[in-house]
Amino acid sequence: MLSIALAGKPNAGKSTFYTAATMAEVDVANYPFTTIDANRGVSYVRTECPCLEREERCDADNCEEGKRYVPVELIDVAGLVPGAHEGKGLGNQFLDALTDADVIINVVDASGGTTEKGEPVDVGSHDPMGDIDFIEEEMDLWLAGIVERNWEGIERQSRSPGFDIDDALADMLSGFGASPTQVARVLREIDYPEDPIQWTDDHRETLAREVRERTKPIVVAANKIDIAPEGNVEALLDLEKPVVPTTAEGELALRRAAEGGLVDYDPGDSEVVIGDGVSDSQREALAGLAETMDRFGGTGVQAALDYAVYDLLDHVTAYPVQDVSKWTDGTGTVLPDALLLPRGSTPVDLAYAVHSDIGEGYLHAVDARSSREIGEGYELEEGDVIKIVSTA
Ligand SMILES: Nc1nc2c(ncn2[C@@H]2O[C@H](COP(=O)(O)OP(=O)(O)OP(=O)(O)O)[C@@H](O)[C@H]2O)c(=O)[nH]1
Ligand SMILES: [Mg+2]
């Protein structure tokens, strides 16, 4: 499963975002380092289900009237302060939790109500701009530290015959979640000595930064938009980086209200319908939230997750089925599964994603929309419904 990590300085709203997005109960409080051990859970990205093209909506668990929710892993980690890579705050314990992540959501307190160490201050008194860069820098230095610590091993290996620096680096960086292809691509773009003994700290830092950028891309969640000064949010949105405005607390309130039957709201909806059963104070709070959603097109929590997977990671959703006319599996369930694959993936990749046996026994694939056979080199598109024919 794809893995998304919530990183950021303490007290920015990571655990609130996590709770809203997974509906799992974790500690949330207005002081730094509430979270110590990382929380891991299942969340979802939202897309349009192909069942919208059919007469009836599908019966998949994760489809709500054509709003399709595709599972991803979400990790909520301890807050990060400047100097974390040297062990400040909770230090490396935090950073190691990012190893498994495919993409990072950097939760920033856009309200300016907390310092860079997460201590509460008056709203608007801390400039959130700096909180974006230091997170990237800490991640880069953390990886540079890992490279540095492993360097002696690389130097030792270089004395044996047949040593290849590219292979050795790919091997070392695979522990950080970097694929050999990603490492190879980085190495093609930077200048470095073949002999590891001639590498300087600069070489190692450049390598670390480039690998980090490619293997852990970042989208910023400009959080607490419900209380943030307008200028702060505007300045963050003006950055030449991906930034999604969010109110994690608002999303959490909506999901709880929807669970309690007080409102009509599905994650990612741009508006909320307030029901009759709410008290006056609930109505007031929800109306305030509805106004924030009006300004930003929703609470942004679902949008940030979707951006991470569909834009930054450039994934597509494919739907394997057995019956090309009914779009069902062997038990008659319509569109039972939705799988996320990197753009450029083929029907063979989809077969492997379903099961390695299905991949190994792959014979051919059929596009369920046209009932035509598609070639092995066909690149899957968002929403493709595919029948895999396999010996398995
Ligand atoms: N107004 C507002 N407050 C929020 C929002 N999101 C979180 N908060 C509040 O911010 C404080 C910190 O939230 P947490 O979710 O515990 O923050 P964290 O980033 O996990 O903090 P650490 O675990 O200490 O790193 C809590 O008081 C939350 O209620 C939001 O969107 N709007
Ligand atoms: Mg937390």
Image (cartoon, rainbow, N blue to C red):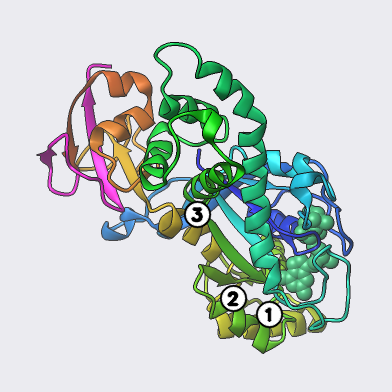
Mark 1–mark 3 CB contact (< 8 Å): no
Relative to 96, say whether 116 is above or below.
below
Quadrant location, ligand no. 2 = bottom right
Q: Characterize the magenta stretch by its predominant secondary structure.
A: loop
Mark 1–mark 2 distance (CA, rounded to whole Å)? 9 Å
Circle 3: residue type: Val
Circle 1: residue type: Leu
- Label 1 or label 2, whichever lies nearer to me, is 1
Q: Residue 223: image x %, image y %?
A: 68, 70
| Apparent side of residue 239 relative to residue 135 in the rendered image (left or right) | left
Mark 1–mark 3 distance (CA, rounded to whole Å)? 22 Å
Check residue 45 in the rendering and tell me which mark sits there, or answer none.
3
Q: Is residue 383 magenta?
A: yes
Mark 1–mark 2 CB contact (< 8 Å): yes
Q: How many marks?
A: 3
* Mark 2, residue position: 272
Residue occupying the far front of the picture: 198
